[in-house]
Amino acid sequence: MRAPSIDITHVPAPLRPLMLAMARGAAEMAGVIRRGDRRMAAEMGVNSNGDGQKRLDLDADALFRDALRHAGLRWYASEELCDPVAIQDDGDWALAIDPLDGSSNIDTNVSIGTIFAVYPAGTDANASFLRPARELICGGYVIYGPRCSMVVSFGDGTQIYALNPDTDCFDLTEARLSLPDTSFEFAINASNYRHWPRPVRAYIDDCLAGTDGPRDKNFNMRWIGSLVAEAHRILMRGGIFLYPADDRPGYARGRLRMLYECAPIAFLIEQAGGRATDGALPILDARVTALHGRTPLVFGSADKVNRVAAYHDLPEAEVSALFGNRGLFRA
Ligand SMILES: O=P(O)(O)OC[C@H]1O[C@](O)(COP(=O)(O)O)[C@@H](O)[C@@H]1O
Ligand SMILES: [Mg+2]
Ligand SMILES: [Mg+2]
């Protein structure tokens, strides 16, 4: 079999070495996951975010760092590493990566993934990463599901590639994806309901009320626990995802990290015609002041994300009043 590769026809020339290296790493990861060694889910310690690390989190980080050694990277920043790592002194790019997204699903054979964002390298690591998210030039993820796919954008639409098991090449299957707005599915970890801010509770209450409530239609709920899998479902058939801030200790800015989770997903969603906000403001207009900084995340079909923002725009007293007058929000 040939070395793993990707169809580079739609990849901007300066980013081709990087994308070929990402494709090699992703194909190798797909093989590791397919082989399914039970030790993949072994607990290994805690990362700088305080999240538990599984063996596959660490192996994925080492695998991608190695695959990207000669790909023109100046800086490599990973969820699993406290600080960015210098790779090539003359590299042009800074890459932020969540090497393994959905760690809690490793042992359940549910889809997991890799998420990444590329910025032009700045004068140092901070200048490279702590900047407005909209300055990224490439955002993408790999989903290790029943099919292995890579979804990527270079700022001119969202593309999908599928890993061909016969050639080990990521073939282009969709050059310009358009996010449908027909779904009535929402995704949120409802076990945290009592901790959510009022606007989020009001939005979900109205979805749950279905045809008996102000929305006057029934909704369906999905929660996989892998951000890549939720993003992929929403890109394929629409809907909305919410991971809000909540009042649990450590969740004042939600759970998901800006650089290597929220920004690349927001980029892919916007490039497919959807919207991504922190509940109110676009994710891509924000910047974090620390490498592992978090942000609340709401993304999906534009009309649904706009509706969440409308709930956030209301003063607290008016959100409360809505509980008695939901007709205001009838679609
Ligand atoms: O367990 P919770 O609070 O529902 O959080 C689930 C979220 O956490 C994550 O697993 C965080 O990502 P990691 O697995 O990379 O830490 C997301 O994929 C997922 O959306
Ligand atoms: Mg993650
Ligand atoms: Mg991770």
Image (spheres, grey):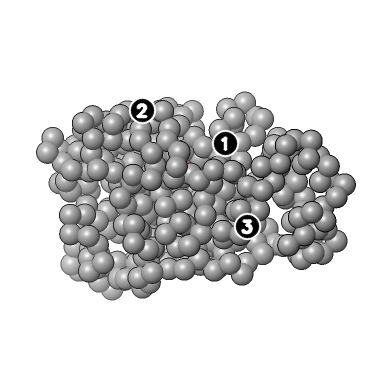
How many angstroms separate mark 3 from mark 1 (CA)? 20 Å
Tell me where residue 132 sits by quadrant: top left
Instruction: Name the residue tied to disc 2.
Output: 82
Horizontal and vertical percent for residue 304? Answer: 63, 57
Q: Nearer the viewer, mark 1 or mark 2?
A: 1
Taking the image as shown, residue 91 lies to the left or right of residue 45, namely: left
- Looking at the image, residue 104 lies above or below residue 150: above
Q: Nearer the viewer, mark 3 or mark 2?
A: 3
Instruction: Name the residue tied to disc 3.
Output: 304
Horizontal and vertical percent for residue 207? Answer: 74, 56
Taking the image as shown, residue 93 lies to the left or right of residue 192, namely: left
State the residue at coordinates (61%, 59%): 303
SS state under label 3: helix
Tell me where residue 261 sits by quadrant: top left
Instruction: Name the residue tied to disc 1.
Output: 254
Q: Of callouts 1 and 2, which one flags the residue occurring earlier in the amino acid sequence? A: 2
SS state under label 1: loop
Residue 107 or residue 317, whichever sits in front: 317
Horizontal and vertical percent for residue 218? Answer: 76, 65
How many angstroms separate mark 3 from mark 2 (CA)? 36 Å
- Looking at the image, residue 22 lies above or below residue 255: below
Q: Of callouts 3 and 1, which one flags the residue occurring earlier in the amino acid sequence? A: 1
State the residue at coordinates (36%, 28%): 82
